[in-house]
Amino acid sequence: MPLVHPDDRFTYADYLSWPEGERWEIVDGEAFAMTPAPSFGHQRVIGRIYYLLEAALHLGPCVPCVSPVDVVLAEDTVVQPDVVVVCDRSKIQPAGIRGAPDLVVEVLSPSTALRDRGTKRDLYERYGVREYLTVDPVARFAERYLLREDGTYGKPDLFGPEDSLRLASLAGLEIPLAEVFEGILPPEAAIPS
């Protein structure tokens, strides 16, 4: 749920004054708490995507990073995507990233899926993120949005668990989704007590 700011809207300066250990995002001045902690499958997918990107991009010009890292898109807009790749290293600052990453990946969870596929998709489009992926660890599919010449994403490309996802923002680097979803517990799997 967003916080109510007594005066106007939250800014990056406000954000920097908040207690450490809490995870927040600000979208157009509105603050959103990032709780509860994500599921095992969610974190496993993030780790697999980051691992595959890091292995492929190691020592190249593009740098992958896994959450939490602040991405400051504007003074009133700070997000913490699950995985980002930045190819313009001047955007990488000691406190995080300033400006649009080349690639943003959000792994869906029940509490964030609508926001990731709506508000954040629109936000990444507006700020010029070249390629935006949403990945569903339960249904095991990915949606890819590519920024077109007119500055919009258009309809997403859909990829299933047996597809390889060719990343346009990273010179055609391929991510095999079977490897991304490897080791994910099915949603009905119970943990023995």
Image (cartoon, rainbow, N blue to C red):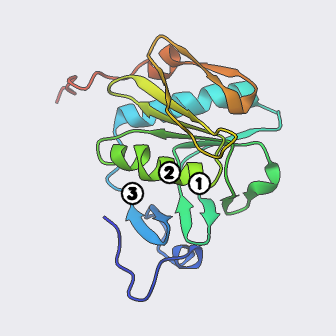
Crowding at mark 2 (Cα within 10 Å: few <14, some 14-19, many 20+): some
Relative to 147, 112 lies left or right: left
In the image shown, does 155 or 124 lie closer to the viewer? 155
Count how many numbered circles sit on residues in the image.
3
The residue lying furthest to the left in this view is 193
For numbered disc 1, what is the local secondary structure? helix
Is label 2 or label 3 in front?
2
In the picture of the structure, the residue carrying the numbered disc 2 is 122
Relative to 4, 92 lies left or right: right
Circles 1 and 2: CB distance less than 8 Å? yes
Circles 2 and 3: CB distance less than 8 Å? no
In the image shown, does 151 or 170 lie closer to the viewer? 151
Of the numbered discs 2 and 3, the one sitting upstream in the chain is 3
Q: Is residue 118 visible?
A: yes
The residue lying furthest to the bottom in this view is 7
Q: CA distance from mark 1 to mark 2?
A: 6 Å
Relative vertical location of residue 176 with respect to residue 24 in this rendering, above or below: above
